[in-house]
Image (tube, helix red, strand yellow):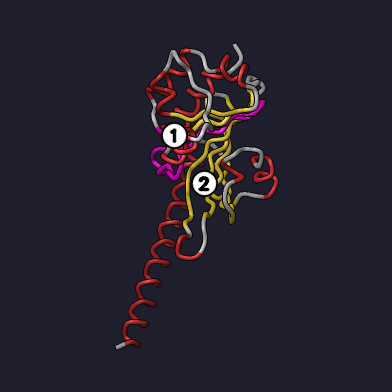
Amino acid sequence: MILLIILGSVVVVTIIIYAIWYFNRKRTKTLRLVAESLNFTFSEKGDKPLMDSLSGFDLFSRGYGRRISNVLSGKFNLLPVTVLDYHYTMGGGISTSTLHQTVLVIESEKLNLPRFILHPEDIFDKIASAFGKEGINFEAAPLFSKQYLLNGDNETSIRSLFNASVLDYYEQHRGVSTEGDGVKLIYYRFFHRVSPDKIQDFLRQGYDVFDLFKIR
């Protein structure tokens, strides 16, 4: 009986591993076709220079086992962009979890951003706030301040950057995360991989965010 249980467990685990491998391979093949349709270059794996160039962002410093894959690079509305899948692992033992998201990276001389991190406020942020660790809030935009946690190195510059139009955009587009630093901007949703057929929509959304922050 014990042997049958062990064998059954091995079969189940094997099926799960194969299913994950199969769907990941299918995703890679489809994204390669998407890249071709957009006249983008495609790389199945990210390289160290790319990872190093993103290491200053909060998202790319989380957890361990960080890996980039399915990298699409090209121009969208004449703007150089990179779309990539990124995952990292948190915890250990039975509490280990690997977190996946699709990230849009924009680098443009039309940006001059103070370093900032914006993401939806979760229960842990609310607990931290109760102990006095708060982000940058806006009295004129209570809904934004309730939905999001905004932090950065230069509060004055960040407040100037997040004008009424920017605050309104994020109030209308709940759940997105954005980080900026100088000429770089990244846009994503935590723990969400964009399906291949939605990549162009994702690019349009990211371009809208770029348009909010670009130098006028």
Q: Residue at (60%, 44%) from the top-left corner?
A: 60
Indicate the amino acid at tag 1.
Answer: Glu
Choose between 76 and 128: the one closer to the eye.
128
Residue 85: mark in rendering: 2
Quarter placement of the C terminus: top right
Indicate the amino acid at tag 2.
Answer: Asp
Quarter placement of the N terminus: bottom left
Q: Earlier in the sequence, mark 2 or mark 1?
A: 2
Q: Quadrant of residue 115?
A: top right
Describe residue 101's horizontal placement relative to residue 68 as left or right.
left
Q: Secondary structure at mark 1?
A: loop
Give the percent coordinates (x, y) of residue 141. Answer: 42, 16
Choose between 161 and 203: the one closer to the eye.
161
What distance separates the C-alpha of mark 2 from that of mark 1? 23 Å
Residue 190: mark in rendering: none
Number of other residues with Cα within 10 Å of mark 1, as a class: few under 14, some 14 to 19, many 20 or more: some
Number of other residues with Cα within 10 Å of mark 2, as a class: few under 14, some 14 to 19, many 20 or more: many
Give the percent coordinates (x, y) of residue 2. Answer: 33, 87
Q: Quadrant of residue 94?
A: bottom left
> Residue tagged by mark 1?
121
Give, as a single range, the part of the protein colored magenta.
175-198
Q: Residue at (57%, 51%) from the top-left corner?
A: 63
